[in-house]
Image (tube, grey):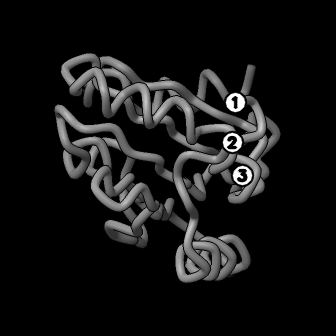
Amino acid sequence: MSGTVLVDIPQEVKDSLRKFRFKRRSQGSAAIVIKINKAKLVLEEVEQFDDITIEELAEELPENSPRYVVLSYELKHSDGRTSFPLVLINWSPSSSETGMMTLHASALLNFQNTADVSKVIEVRDGPEGLTKEVIDAKLLA
C-alpha cells in the first residue's frame, strides 16, 4: 500500500497552490486552507486569506475537523530583515473524527510534496496551539 494514493489532488487545487506560492507579498501573512472531501476522496480549497493574523486564522479553522493550511508568514528576524517563508500547518484537532484523522494523516506527505513546502507545524490543540509565538519559535529555532 506504500505507493497507493488514497486522496486525489485535483488540478484546480494545484493551480491555486501554485498561484498562492508565487504571489508577491510585502507585508502581512496570508493563508490558503485545504480540506479533504471524505465522500469523493479529493482535496478541496476552502478559503484564502490575505493579510490575516495567526490568531485570526486560528479562529477561522474548525475545532473538530482537520485541515491543511499553507501559510505565507511574515517573519521578522533579529537582524531587522523580514522574510515570508511558506509553512504547512497540519491542523488536526484531537476532537476530530478518527476516520477523518487517519485519512488526513495518510494524505499529508503527498499534499506536502504537491504544495512544495518543507516546514510543517503540527497543531493538535486548537486555537491555543496556533499563535504567533508558536510559529516564531518553530521558524526561528
Q: CA distance from mark 3 to mark 1?
A: 33 Å
* Residue closest to the eye, 30 or 7: 7
Q: Position of residue 25 (x, y in %)?
A: 63, 75
Say which residue appears at 30% left-offset and 18% top-offset. Answer: 125
Residue 51 picture quarter: bottom left
Quadrant (top left, top right, bottom left, bottom right) of the C terminus: top right
Mark 1 Cα shell of 10 Å, populated few (<14), some (14-19), many (≥20): few
97 shown above or below 91: above
Q: Secondary structure at mark 1?
A: loop
Tell me, for residue 86, which label it has, or none.
Answer: none
The reply to whether the C-beta atoms of the residues labelled 3 and 1 are less than 8 Å apart is no
The reply to whether the C-beta atoms of the residues labelled 1 and 2 are less than 8 Å apart is yes
Query: In screen coordinates, is 34 left or right of 128?
Result: right
Is residue 32 at all visible to an observer of this figure? yes
107 shown above or below 81: above
In the picture of the structure, the residue carrying the numbered disc 3 is 85
> Which is in the foreground here, disc 3 or disc 1?
1
In the picture of the structure, the residue carrying the numbered disc 1 is 1
Query: In screen coordinates, is 60 left or right of 44?
Result: left
Say which residue appears at 77% left-offset and 39% top-offset. Answer: 3
Residue 88 picture quarter: top right
Mark 2 Cα shell of 10 Å, populated few (<14), some (14-19), many (≥20): few
Q: CA distance from mark 1 to mark 2?
A: 5 Å
Q: Position of residue 138 (x, y in %)?
A: 64, 24
